[in-house]
Image (cartoon, grey):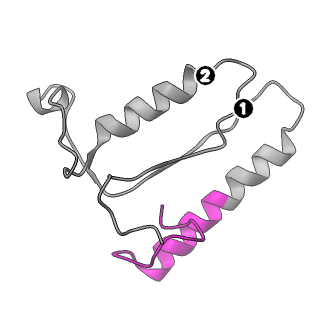
Amino acid sequence: MSGLQYARFVGSSLPFRAAKAAQDGFSQGLVEELKGSNIRITSIYPGLIDDVSPLDSAWETAREIGDGLSNKDVVDAILYALAAPPNVALRQIVIERTKSEFLA
């Protein structure tokens, strides 16, 4: 999320944020370039995540409202986007934990 215009400058370096902003610009450029085609572009913007192995029992453990995000949350969002009907374009999915102060 560091590259999003409305994201607060928390926990990342300026070069990292600039690189993420460039990635966001590239994704949006692809959306415009491929407009009218049957190719859909979805940008996924996860916040800070805990890396949990799919082989670990924690992968299937439901998280509480105050818990942080896991990489499983990102996988679930990607699967959600891929399952969208062909007439639906999900341009951006911002994944943020419920109690976060990252976004303004």
Residue 59 locus on image (x, y percent): 19, 30
Q: Secondary structure at mark 1?
A: loop
Q: Is residue 52 left or right of residue 44?
A: left
Q: Is residue 85 left or right of residue 19?
A: right
Could you tell me residue 52's position as x and y percent? 19, 39
Q: Nearer the viewer, residue 55 or 36?
A: 36
In reply to whether residue 51 is colored magenta, the answer given is no
Look at the picture and state if 95 lies above or below 73: below
Q: Please name the residue that numbered disc 1 is placed on.
A: 40
* Within-10-Å neighbours for mark 2: few <14, some 14–19, many 20+: few
Q: Marks 1 and 2, how far apart in space?
A: 10 Å
Q: Residue at position x 45%, y 67% from top? A: 103
In this rendering, the count of numbered labels is 2
Q: Is residue 43 left or right of residue 29?
A: left
Q: Along the line of sight, which residue is nearer the eye, 44 or 66?
A: 66
- Report the amino acid beneath label 2: Ala
Identify the residue shown where x is 18% and y is 32%: 62
Residue at image x 57%, y 65%? Answer: 4
Which residues make up the magenta segment? 1-24
On the image, numbered disc 2 is attached to which residue?
A: 84
Residue plotted at (90% across, 32% down): 36
The magenta stretch spans residue 5: yes
* Residue 32 shown left or right of residue 22 in the figure: right
Amino acid marked by disc 1: Arg
- In the rendered structure, are the residues bearing label 1 and label 2 in contact, judged by CB atoms less than 8 Å apart? yes
